[in-house]
Amino acid sequence: MMPESIEGYTEDLFGCRFADDSFDPEGEEDHLKESWDLFDHYPWPEVFPVWFRYLTQKCPSASDVINFANLYVYYDAGRRPVPCPIEFIGYLYCKVDMDVYWDEAGDLFDGLAINVLSHSGCLNFEEDPYYSPLRDESILRAASEWKNGRQDALELSLNRCCPD
């Protein structure tokens, strides 16, 4: 039975471990098909705020954030524009120490950042083929704001990214 809300879909889609052997084994792509069903029933501008809230409220550890990013890419969401690409990417880098998790998240986050920023109109990769999110002052500033514990960072970002 399919969930009846974006939140229900989100819990199903992100409440699993991407690296787990039982996750969508070859030929059985249940989660991927469920993501297609979600996108068929709800417009992306309604889905993204729920996913961003899930990330910020239900992914407390670096491994949870890396898992979220892997699933986000797997569900092909990286090619969709987001209303707050800088805050979104900054949050990922804030929660994951790249010195510790480079092997698990380096290429994943770089690719996701380039896709999100490009599809959101913030980056023309053809004009800047050597772009690196870890050298982008706006990404670093957003990550720093998240990291420095600004009490209002979450609500400000959610309000900027996901206005009701």
Image (spheres, helix red, strand yellow):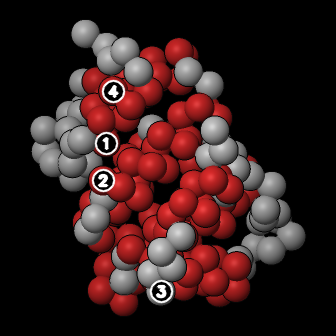
Q: Secondary structure beneath disc 4?
A: helix
Rate crowding at label 4 as few (under 14), some (14 to 19) or many (20 or more) other CA atoms within 10 Å. few
**Amino acid on which disc 2 is placed:** Lys
Of badges 4 and 3, nearer the viewer stands 3
Q: Is residue 106 left or right of residue 144?
A: left
Residue identifier under label 2 = 58
Tell me the residue that label 1 is attached to: 14
> With 41 as the anchor, is 119 left or right in this view?
right
User: In the rendered image, which quarter is residue 140 located in?
Assistant: bottom right
Cα–Cα gap, marks 2 and 4? 14 Å
Q: Tell me the tag on residue 8.
A: 4
**Which residue is located at x 26 percent, y 48 percent?**
18
Task: Estimate how packed mark 2 is, as few (under 14), some (14 to 19) or many (20 or more) residues with alpha carbons within 10 Å.
Answer: some
Kindly state the secondary structure of the residue where label 3 is placed: loop
Callout 4 amino acid: Gly
Q: Is residue 73 left or right of residue 48?
A: left
Residue at 31% from the left image edge and 13% from the top image edge: 2
Q: How far apart are labels 4 and 3 at the CA level?
A: 32 Å
Q: Position of residue 102 (x, y in %)?
A: 37, 80
Q: Earlier in the sequence, mark 2 or mark 4?
A: 4
Upstream in sequence: badge 2 or badge 3: 2
Is residue 32 visible from the viewing direction of this image?
no
Residue at mark 3: 148
Binning the other alpha carbons within 10 Å of mark 3 as few (below 14), some (14 to 19) or many (20 upward) gives few
Residue 129 in picture, x, y percent from top left: 75, 73
Instruction: Residue lying at the far top in this picture: please name it.
Output: 1
User: Looking at the image, which residue is at 13% across and 38% down?
Assistant: 22
Between the C-alphas of marks 1 and 3, the distance is 27 Å
Is the residue marked by circle 1 packed among few (<14), some (14-19), or many (20+) residues within 10 Å?
A: many
Earlier-in-chain disc, 2 versus 1: 1
Q: Mark 3 is on which residue type? A: Asn
